[in-house]
Amino acid sequence: MEIYPDIGGFYGRFGGAYIPELLWANVEELREKYDSILSCSSYREELEGLLRDFVGRPTPLYFAAALSRESGAKIYLKREDLCHTGSHKLNNVTGQALLAVRMGKKQIIAETGAGQHGVATATVCALLKLPCTVFMGSRDMERQMPNVTRMRMLGARVIEVESGSRTLKDATNEAIRHWINNPAESYYLIGSTIGPHPYPDIVTRLQSVISRETITQLEKAEGRKEPDHVLACVGGGSNAAGSFYHFTGNGKTILTGAEAAGEGTDSGKTAATICTGSEGIIHGSRTLLMQTGDGQVRETHSLSAGLDYPGIGPLHARLNEKGLARYIPVKDHEAVEAAFRLTKLEGIIPALESAHAIALLKKISFNPGSIIVICLSGRGDKDMETFEKYFEKQT
Amino acid sequence: MKKNSIKKVYNPLTALLEKKRSRLLSVFFTAGFPELESTGQIIEALEGNGIDFAEVGMPYSDPLADGPVIQQASMKAIGNGMGLKKLFSQLEDAREKFTIPLVLMGYLNPVFQYGVEKFCKDARSAGISGVILPDMPLEQYERNYRQLFEENNLHFIFLITPTTPADRIKKIDSLTTAFIYAVSSSSITGVRKEEKGGGNFFERLKQMKLNNIYIAGFGIHNSGTLEKAWANSAGAITGSAFINKLNGYNDPDIAVKALLNDLYNR
């Protein structure tokens, strides 16, 4: 099945581990151990316990009646925004932190864009009493200050990254460099389905809880296991990988990812990697990325910090190539409008990232009465400043 | 077999290593830094000051194994307009004037975009002796690219670190045609830290009785670190320390002399 990488960590020709020798032993140790730990029954029990009692799973599959009426479909929201810390990120972090403990690691390193992954990591580290260092671009720190405060309150050391674009890409670079410098005791806890093998597989598997729950919940609500559509936003691609997982290649469900078009795919200010990128290597993975003709990684733009990343998980590059999922660009203003629409109709303020998935409702065609599951990956509290600016402009 | 294929055509690095197998000194610089057209002057200064071979850094926007010094030099170089096409034309010119062996060092993505085959051919015609691509996976090299590099008379130089297991070092030794780049500490470039057990690393290497020589790099910036590298291995590679000198002195010749003053404690 396309959702699993081969032995070398490749999804077709995407993926692999293109890493400097300095990282080889770190990554190899993880590669050797992850599968047996993730499949071990005591690990699974411990993880399920925490997902239930600490994260707050299962998250509801909420029938959005007003949005459904407006759209002419039966729309269900998978409420990942109701997870502890406010996004799906905690699913992955909890799983990887337990993996780190079982590998005997003593401290956690993470990167963060919007700060959701950083907050989730700082949270689990507080719970498990693990020292935690989070790298965050200075530009992202400015636009997501509440999350910086949360991380610090949780005891994490937040390191401001001034290099390059000062966003997620460079935060990831710095986290990896820190890992090179502190190899033996550190676990690098990556936040999306990116990076060298085995990270994309680890994160995909840990996020697959989203589609696993969806199956059971949808069966109860609708008497069928497969929705007609699943919609999710894609930055690195973790919530999309998790919400597509069990529906991939089933021949019944159309999977659609929303990429951040920024100001438009031909504006030069975009983060729509699949639509406008080309094949290459970023953060140890062969995938699609935004780059110049000389192979330099381009700076991207999205109003949403969580989608402002020049690469895409190799799994998505593969699903796109095989036609098993499609990826549609959504502009900044379309996402903001969708956020306001959802808020007004359903009383739910989505994260700007998740609002890109909501915006797909106006971009895809579906049969009347279709069952559509949208992954509402996070809540919008962190985006108030952006929403406020937009609100002022409108009134 | 592989040794033969690389030896049949003259290769300046092969020739160097045939006559000198200890106390080698190599200097790394980022092409396009401080100025777009600095490449030739820097090569001239390195040759003029008796550096054994030079590593020409191909700047990349996201150099994962590099510290702030080389990162900043790379960004500056990219901003100056440096790219592989430009670099090869500069190196073609330099080749007519200088004989110092040149090794290209950089990351895989720009090479992929250029096309690995075209890269190898252009490197060959620019008289390049070898290539270091730290993020090229060993298995990929062996399966997909080894033949290409060897056909073009290019040594492929692998890195090893104190965390590289013995069987992997042996494997790397078997694929090596010039020397192994031994990173003496688990760190990115330009980090001046003493590895606990760093001495053990070279002791281990010595006992492994490898077929190839190894040259130490990363963190070499003064006579102490240089002498240590020379005692432990066949030579030393210094990079960030030289970039720092280029930052301080505009003239490459003065920068090389200042570097040598530090290294030789003059």
Image (spheres, coloured by chain):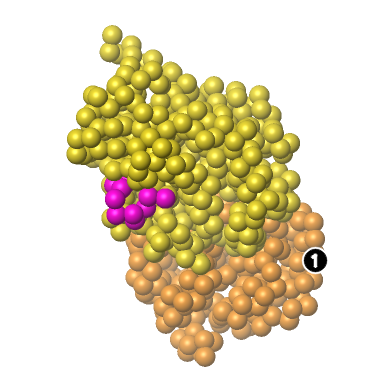
Chain colours: A yellow, B orange
- Residue A279: x, y in percent? 35, 57
Q: State the residue at coordinates (30%, 42%).
A: A229
Q: Nearer the viewer, residue B93 or B141?
A: B141
* Tally of marks: 1
For disc 1, the marked residue is B200
Q: Nearer the viewer, residue A26 or B181?
A: A26
Q: State the residue at coordinates (28%, 32%).
A: A74
- Residue A363: x, y in percent? 22, 36
Q: Is residue A254 magenta?
A: yes
Q: Quadrant of the C terminus of chain B?
A: bottom right
**Tag 1, which chain?**
B
Residues in magenta, as a range: A246-257
Q: Is residue A339 left or right of residue B194?
A: left
Quarter of the rendering containing residue B109: bottom left
- Residue A224: x, y in percent? 35, 43
Task: Please say whether residue B71 is visible from this viewpoint.
Answer: no
